[in-house]
Image (tube, rainbow, N blue to C red):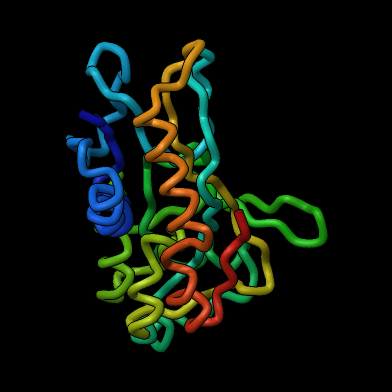
Amino acid sequence: TLRLAAPAAFGRRYLAPVLAGFSARFGDLRIEASFSDRVVDLVSDGFDLAIRGGAIVDDHLIARRLMRFRGVCIASPAYLARAGRPETPADLLQHACVVNHGLRTMPGWVFSRHGEELRVDVDGPLRSDDGDVLVSAAEAGLGVAYEPDFLAAQALDEGTVVPLLTDYTPDEGSIFAVYVNRSHLPVKVRLFIDHLLEVWAEPPWSGLCRNAGVQVPRR
């Protein structure tokens, strides 16, 4: 049995669809998948590996990068018609922003241009630790959101939100496969990571983002 954990929204959208292909290739392996935003302890909770985003700071864990992601600043056409379009990150101070209070940069949104980091401490009518909630709020016209491209991709493709501040480089991060540092990597873990690297040679949300004019970073 391969026991794995992944963030809820990311797991539902991108990990669940690849499990069938892995199971078909390695039919002797049973998969137990937990999709939750709780950060599991791989040892005490009995997981073989976890999918995580952002920096990995535990020296007892090994992190294998699977792909990169990028933040994207978004708002609905209705909101922009009412409030105007921000042209610089500093303009966000005059806008209603829906904020993810779980971000490591909280309450700041980070951009860069010409090698200079630009941080704006935003605020607004809604704070949540659920990125899907914030994307939905942006679609509904509540304000501007700044979320990972993998969460915003579908809304961008459907045109319910549009990208903002595209002349600025947004904050970037990585998706990792994380497992316990052992002298020998279990075969089932290696097989699953190799499978992910194969099927995710390109981020699965990249086509949706490109359709909306948003570039996705390479692995």
The answer, for residue 128, to whether it is visible in the render is no
Q: Residue at x 41, y 61 (%)?
A: 150
Residue plotted at (42% across, 67% down): 205
- Along the viewing direction, whichever of 200 and 170 lies nearer the viewer: 200
Residue 45 vs residue 175: left or right?
Answer: left
Residue 141 quadrant: bottom left
How many numbered marks appear?
Answer: 0
> In the displayed image of the protein, which residue is found farthest to the bottom?
81
Q: Is residue 88 above or below residue 52?
A: below
- Depth check, front residue: 199 or 72: 199
**Residue at the image position 31 percent from the left and 19 percent from the top:** 41
Image point (17%, 36%), residue name? 30
Q: Is residue 5 visible?
A: yes
Q: Quadrant of the N terminus?
A: top left
Tell me if residue 156 comes above or below residue 13 in the rendering.
below
Give the answer, above or below, for where 103 lies relative to 91.
above
How far across and how far down the image is residue 43, in percent?
31, 13
Image x and y of residue 3, in percent: 24, 30
x, y (%) of residue 152? Answer: 39, 66
The residue nearer to you, when weighing 189 against 16, is 189
- Whether residue 158 sits left or right of residue 197 in the image: it is left
Residue 192, percent across and down?
38, 40
